[in-house]
Image: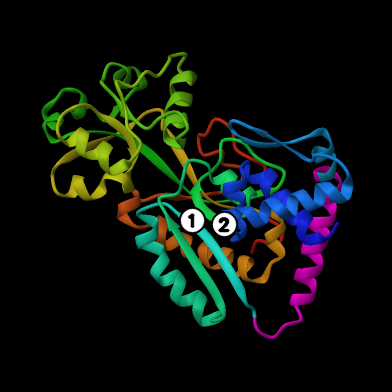
């Protein structure tokens, strides 16, 4: 049993399938299978069970995962401590960011970061997939700037940046309606409209459902669409209304294709940095976090975001539940 075999085994369990693990590890799937078979042969026990949905650890596999977690963390600590003596910081960082933040932040972020750390390779992912948590825990991502996850996780740290308000968005023709002449729309007003929203895995959908729940009401959108641009175009054509932060529809509103109004009580989302807690002591990750936090006040003040409000300690952002923050080493 060697460290490489253990790393491969743990990656398979985290990813859930041999195919995903092979892609994550950047090795051929047959080679990965052979390594696991060798580990099972050395230990004399089956570690993985194949199912129609992928692979799951056997009781022996679960025991191995539990016993080697501290070992993996210790190796990471050793690697970071020793590499800290290096004069040049190297390696790579994979981080995700939602549009339009990629346009607003990434060019300047790359310029500033590469000046300080020219030997670090940056990989930027726009319009991230459904599960940021899975991407971070499987080590496919190192960091993300997204809506705060609805649930905390022992291995993740959440660093809030700013708070955005969701607004009720309708087609241009809605400007003449009695509703859009009001100072703000209520949840009862919204309940009477044909709403177009993302599916239930999406953070905006969860925020809307939580707002309705606080008013003892259920949220039933008329149409579900995943994709802000498609939702906006559907609303522009008069097929319904949506709830969205300013950045999502700013361009079409400026062109006169959409109108928007405030919602009371406010529905807020918290845009945050999310990373694996273990990476807070990593030089390049900590540096990227620091640069993003430095940029946050200027970005939050941009009209395209509303403007947004910088997060203050103790502000729950109007979310259903806000995770405990672990900021040590993040600055």
Residue 96's tag is 1
Q: Secondary structure at mark 1?
A: strand
209 is higher (above) or lower (below) than 78:
above
Residue 36 coordinates in the image, percent (x, y): 74, 50
Tell me if mark 1 has few (under 14), some (14-19) or many (20+) residues whose alpha carbon lies within 10 angstroms of its own: many
Range of the magenta residues? 65-88
- Image quadrant in which the N terminus is located: bottom right
Depth check: 117 or 50 in front? 50
Name the residue that disc number 2 marks.
Answer: 143
In magenta segment, residue 87:
yes
Residue 46 in view (yes/no): yes
Tell me if mark 2 has few (under 14), some (14-19) or many (20+) residues whose alpha carbon lies within 10 angstroms of its own: many
Q: Residue at 69% across / 43% down in the picture?
A: 13
Do the numbered discs 1 and 2 sit on residues whose CB atoms are within 8 Å? yes
Q: Secondary structure at mark 2?
A: strand
Left or right, residue 74 beside residue 283: right
226 is higher (above) or lower (below) than 43:
above
In magenta segment, residue 329:
no
Magenta stretch secondary structure, dominant: helix
Left or right, residue 129 beside residue 64: left
Count the labels in the image: 2
Q: Quadrant of residue 212?
A: top left
- Image quadrant in which the C terminus is located: bottom right
Q: Residue at 48% across / 41% down in the picture?
A: 130
Q: Residue at 69% across / 86% down in the picture?
A: 87
Residue 83 coordinates in the image, percent (x, y): 74, 76
Residue 314 coordinates in the image, percent (x, y): 61, 42
271 is higher (above) or lower (below) than 328:
above
Structure colour scheme: rainbow
Residue 69 in view (yes/no): no
């Amino acid at each position: 049993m060697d460290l490489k075999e253990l790393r491969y085994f743990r990656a398979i369990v985290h990813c859930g399938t041999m195919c995903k693990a092979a892609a994550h590890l950047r090795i051929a799937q047959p080679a990965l299978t052979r390594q696991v078979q060798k580990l099972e042969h050395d230990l004399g026990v089956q570690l993985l069970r194949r199912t129609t949905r992928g692979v799951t650890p056997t009781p022996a596999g679960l025991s191995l995962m539990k016993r080697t977690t501290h070992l993996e963390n210790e190796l990471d600590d050793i690697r970071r401590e020793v590499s800290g003596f290096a004069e040049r910081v190297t390696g790579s960082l994979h981080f995700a960011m939602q549009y339009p933040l990629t346009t607003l932040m990434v060019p300047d972020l790359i310029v500033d970061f590469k000046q300080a750390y020219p030997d670090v390779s940056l990989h930027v992912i726009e319009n991230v997939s459904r599960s940021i948590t899975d991407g971070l825990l499987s080590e496919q991502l190192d960091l993300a700037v997204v809506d705060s996850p609805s649930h905390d996780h022992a291995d993740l740290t959440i660093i809030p940046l700013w708070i955005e308000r969701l607004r009720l968005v309708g087609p241009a023709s809605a400007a003449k309606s009695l509703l859009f002449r009001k100072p703000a729309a209520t949840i009862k007003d919204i309940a009477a409209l044909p709403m177009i929203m993302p599916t239930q895995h999406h953070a905006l959908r969860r925020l809307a459902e939580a707002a309705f729940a606080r008013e003892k009401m259920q949220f039933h959108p008329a149409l579900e669409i995943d994709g802000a641009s498609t939702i906006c175009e559907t609303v522009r054509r008069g097929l319904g209304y949506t709830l969205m932060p300013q950045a999502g529809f700013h361009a079409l509103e400026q062109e006169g294709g959409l109108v928007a109004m405030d919602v009371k009580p406010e529905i807020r989302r918290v845009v945050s940095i999310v990373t694996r807690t273990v990476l807070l002591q990593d030089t390049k990750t900590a540096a990227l976090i620091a640069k993003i936090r430095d940029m946050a006040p200027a970005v939050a003040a941009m009209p395209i975001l509303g403007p947004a409000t910088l997060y203050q300690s103790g502000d729950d952002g109007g979310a259903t539940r806000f995770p405990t923050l672990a900021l040590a080493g993040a600055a």
